[in-house]
Image: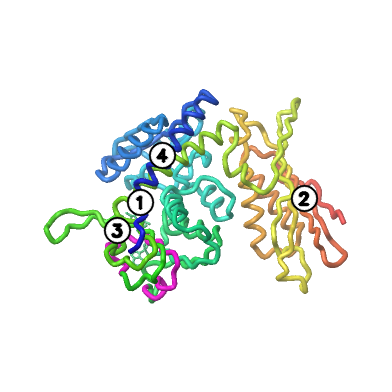
Amino acid sequence: MAEKIDGKAIAEDLSAGIAADVRAFVAETGVVPALAVVLVGDDPASQIYVKRKLEQTRKVGIRSLEHRLAVETSEADLLALIQAFNADPAVHGILVQLPLPPQINAIRILDAIDPAKDVDGFHPVNVGRLSSGAGGLVPCTPLGCMMLLDKVIDDFRGLKAVVIGKSNIVGKPVALLLLERECTVEVTHILTRNLPEIVRTADIVVVAAGSPGLVRGDWVKPGAVVIDVGINRIVDEDGKPRLVGDVVFAEMDHARAVTPVPGGVGPMTIACLLANTMKAARNQSRGGSAGHRALSAAADVESEANIKLRTVVVRDLSVAADIGVHAHEIGRRQVLLVSVTLRVRPSLSDRLDETIDYTDVVTAAQSLANERISLIESFAARLAAACLRHPLVEEADVLIEKPGALVSGLAAARIVLGRPLMAEHGARQLA
Ligand code: NAD
C-alpha cells in the first residue's frame, strides 16, 4: 500500500513554523511582513484563490493589502500600482493573480514587479536565478512539490525523475529544482511520444498536465514516488461535481508514496507563498534580496562620499568558457575569472538593491560565456556594454583573467566603458 503524502498536514506544520518566524521577525525588527495581492476582474476561480491566500496570510500574522480592480482596468493603471508597491518599503511581497483580462499584457506586469518582492517567483530575474542555481524566490507550487518529496526521499542524487507538463509555473521550475538535487530529469508534454514508457522509467513522477486520470497504475513502476499537481473539476457518474488530479489514485497501491487530490500539492502552494513572503521580508530588512546574497560572486560596495557615484564590485565571478582558448584547448571549458567594477549613480531611495542588480551582471556574464566569442577582450567589451544598459550605471570596468592559460600569451584583458559616448576608454593586455 502506497504511503499517502498528507499535504494538508505538512502545509499546516509549515504555516505554524512561518507564524513563529513572523512573530520572531516582528519582535526583532518592529516590522510586520506585508503581502500586496492584486486581483483584476471577477473571475470566480481567481476570487476563490485570492480569498484563500488572504485568509492564510492573515492567519500567520502577515499583513495583507488587498486590491480588487475592475475588469476594465488599463495596463498603465496596473503598472502604476505595481510601481507604487515596489517603492513602498512597507510592502515586502507582491502577488498579481493570473489570469489577467485581455487588455493587460501579463508578461509586462510580471516583469514590472521588483524581483525582491516577487513572491510568485515568475520574474525573469528569479527564473534566471533558479536556472543557474543561485537561489532567489522560487515559484510556490514547485517549491511545495519539493517539500513533499523531501518528506519521503532522503537522497535524490541519481534518481530518475519524469515531469509531465512543461508550463512556466509548474513543469519547468520543478524540473530545474529536481536537476539541482542531482536527479536525472526528463520533461515531457502533450506531444511526447511513448509517454507511458518514459514514466515507467521514473523513480519520481511529477504530473502537472491538467488532464484527469492521465497517469494510470501501469505507467508507474513499483516503489516510485508520485506527486500529482493536477486540479481538475469533473462531474462524476452520480452527476456530482468532484475535484480530481491527473493521476488515478486508486491504481497507485504499488507506488512508494503518492499525493492525493485534494489535500496534496494544493495546500502546499499557499503555505509556500507565505514562506516566500517571509523570506522576502527578511531579505529586505537586511537591505538585500536573496539572490544577491546567494551569488557565488563576492559583491562589495564602496561609498564615494564626495562624488555622487558608487562603485559596485563583483569580483572573481568564475565563468567556465571556451572563450580566449587556443584551438587545441577548445572543449576544456577553462575557468575565466571575471571582475566587474561599476560606477553607479545613487537611486532616489539610495538603497543599493534598487540601484543595481548584481545578478544582472552575473547573468550577462554567464550568457555571454555560452556564446561563441573567441577573444577575452571582446567578452570584456560586450559585458561592459551590457552593464551600461542599466540606466544608473555610469562606467563599467571589466577585468577578465584566464588563470589556467595553457600557453604563454594573453592571460587577462581589461576594458573600461563609460557614458555618455560609451566609448572605449582603454583596453589593455595585462599579461
Ligand atoms: P498548463 O496548461 O500551462 O500546462 C500543462 C502542460 O501539460 C503542458 O506542457 C502540456 O503540454 C502538458 N500536457 C497536457 N496534457 C497532457 C497529456 N495528455 N500528456 C502529456 N502532457 C500533457 O498547466 P499548468 O498551469 O502547469 O497546470 C497543470 C495542472 O496543475 C492543472 O490541472 C492546474 O490546475 C494544476 N495546478 C495546480 C496547482 C496547485 O496548487 N496544486 C498550481 C498550479 C497548477
Q: Identity of the amino acid at label 2?
A: Leu
Residue at image coords 43%, 42%: 14
Q: Identity of the amino acid at label 3?
A: Gly
**Label whose residue precedes the other's in the sequence (1 or 4):** 1
What residue sits right under mark 3 in the picture? 245
Examine the rendering and report whether any part of residue 225 can be seen: yes
Q: Is residue 71 above or below residue 153?
A: above
Residue at image coords 69%, 57%: 319
For marks 1 and 4, give the CA distance. Answer: 14 Å
For marks 4 and 2, give the CA distance. Answer: 46 Å
What residue sits right under mark 1 in the picture? 6
Q: Does the residue labelled 2 lie within 8 Å of ligand 1?
A: no
- Tag 1–tag 3 contact (CB < 8 Å): no
Specify the segment rendered in magenta. Answer: 196-216
Residue at image coords 71%, 38%: 300
Circle 4 — which element? Answer: helix
Circle 3 — which element? Answer: loop
Q: Seen in the image, is 126 located left or right of residue 416?
A: left
- Residue 130: % across, % down: 54, 52
Q: Along the line of sight, which residue is nearer the eye, 253 or 405?
A: 253
- Residue 122: % across, % down: 46, 48
Q: Tell me if residue 279 is in the magenta stretch.
A: no
**Label whose residue precedes the other's in the sequence (4 or 3):** 4
What residue sits right under mark 2 in the picture? 399
- Tag 1–tag 2 contact (CB < 8 Å): no
Is the N terminus in the top left, top right, bottom left or bottom right quadrant? bottom left
What residue sits right under mark 4 in the picture? 15
Circle 2 — which element? Answer: strand
User: In which of the image's four quarters is ligand 1 placed?
Assistant: bottom left
